[in-house]
Amino acid sequence: MIDTHLMKLRARDRVSEEEERAIRGAVSEVREFAADKTIIRAGEDLTVSLLLVDGILCRYKDLSDGQRQITELHVSGDFADLHSFTLKRLDHNVMTMSRCRIAIVPHERLKAITEQHPHLTRLYWFTTNLDAAIHREWEVSLGRRPSLARIAHLFCELQARLGLVGLVNGDGYDLPLTQTEIAECMGLTPVHVNRTLRELRERGLLEFRSGRVSIPDLAALARVAEFDPAYLYLEPRAR
Amino acid sequence: MIDTHLMKLRARDRVSEEEERAIRGAVSEVREFAADKTIIRAGEDLTVSLLLVDGILCRYKDLSDGQRQITELHVSGDFADLHSFTLKRLDHNVMTMSRCRIAIVPHERLKAITEQHPHLTRLYWFTTNLDAAIHREWEVSLGRRPSLARIAHLFCELQARLGLVGLVNGDGYDLPLTQTEIAECMGLTPVHVNRTLRELRERGLLEFRSGRVSIPDLAALARVAEFDPAYLYLEPRAR
DNA sequence: CGTGCCCTTGAGTACAATCAACGTTCGTGG
DNA sequence: CCACGAACGTTGATTGTACTCAAGGGCACG
């Protein structure tokens, strides 16, 4: 049930049997959520963290004029808000982008982990630092990359992150997002995303239709995106 | 010497005498660095973290065409790279923007803290999550805010963060940045930053000259920026 | 078989970038 | 003490990427 989560951790460091038991024991329940529901609102007092088992989630912030900026996407195996354990409330909302299965992890059980499992604590600390690294890479996209590279980069990132948990198949992966949501990730308008996706398609770099991403030539796409996966810290290492 | 650091921690949670001793004992040495020096390069193996005692630092990433994106600014009392403790190498560079005094904290001593001081560990975990929150807010600026609000927001953030460590005086604060560096933070060109600063000045919202920021009417500036300091988690709370 | 959501395309616009030139300040060396 | 150069800041003119506004098409669902 939390297999993708363990895959992700074990891609970065060793997780002992005992630690695995601690992780499994930290889940209090598993719930299903419909698509397009905001499940955490900024400012709420939080006493649990959410571990995404299946589906796609995002973190987003609203602006006063109704615009929204998505700050990160989450895939199977990600904690959506492990950081709420230390922050106690969030500065952003969390929303389902598809039907989702989510494991609930009470903060008191995470606290017990910090008291009893220093290594696992460091590993979880690592994962929130990884979220920050993803935020930084998005800052680069939003601040400096032209729209073509910006969108190409997003799809490269998702290919890498989904690949890690076995969700890449054939020449691509399933991604139940709308063009409007892509726009909200990358600071563009839906119209411009549409034109940019067309250009990617015409260049033979990427197809994105009805929730499915096809990447005929990943190396070519990565070149356009100037994608360097170093920021995803994919190599195992003692933490 | 690390007083601003303790001020910052204590603004967010209680720090016991024993914890304070552990923090002080974690510093191995203090060094001085000249301005405009890259002191950590992306990808290097790291065994220490850097705690900024005095000066201004930034995290930045380079693009292949020579552009750069600054992803966060650091002020006195901030760890520049506490996240390198779990990441072991960085996905970004760290550069001095002024003459800086920096305390060196070996990772092995941080590791000891994670083994012996769970509460302090959570508090330090919190501070890296705060960095991520700042990254998210910058994503919103970079993705969605027009240039005027974008720059106004940056100066509001710095006012709040410098205020926390007693570095706001009179109607503003010292900030030894060039317009080009502001541009690198906010995804704009130096020329456009110049025009935008002029507009802020003409509207009576902000003066920025020779390393000094003056904000005659902070409330008005915050209104233009739509600045909400919630993302800085300024209220104390048990972590 | 509407109705609504999403995608697509066209036309015109605007904000910010680019290109270019000049001013100011400051440090340095003759 | 002044001449020079470099870095930073300022302004104008022009260009361009992405936005806005608008309309129509495809498809799923009730």
Image (spheres, coloured by chain):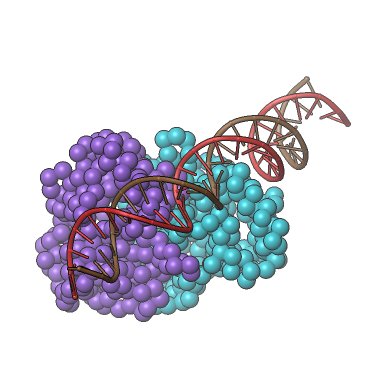
Chain colours: A purple, B cyan, C brown, D red
Tell me the quarter of the picture where residue A217 sits. Answer: top left
Q: Position of residue A7 (x, y in %)?
A: 15, 56
In this picture, is A7 found above or below A103? above
Q: Nearer the viewer, residue C17 or A136?
A: C17
Q: Quadrant of the N terminus of chain A?
A: bottom left
Q: In the picture shown, does residue B214 fall above or below A238?
A: below
Camera-nearest residue between B24 and A168: A168
- Count how many numbered circles sit on residues in the image: 0
Q: Residue at x 71, y 58 (%)?
A: B202
Drawn side of residue B93 relative to residue A107, left or right:
right
- Residue in view at x 12 percent, y 45 percent: A170
Give the quadrant of the C terminus of chain A: bottom left
Q: Kindly identify the residue that appears in the image at 39 percent across and 49 percent down.
A: A192
Q: Position of residue A142 (x, y in %)?
A: 42, 50
Q: Quadrant of residue D4?
A: top right
Residue A92 in sight from this viewpoint: yes
Residue B109 vertical position relative to residue B180 in the rendered view, above or below = below
Q: Position of residue A123 (x, y in %)?
A: 25, 59
* C11 relative position to A122: left or right: right
Front residue (pair A202, A232): A202
Looking at the picture, tell me which residue is in the foreground, A195 or B145.
A195
- Say which residue appears at 12% left-offset and 61% top-offset: A3
Q: From the top left corner, tell me how far across and down residue B108 is, in percent.
A: 33, 54
Asked whether the viewer can see residue A237, the reply is: no
Left or right of A51 on screen, residue B207: right
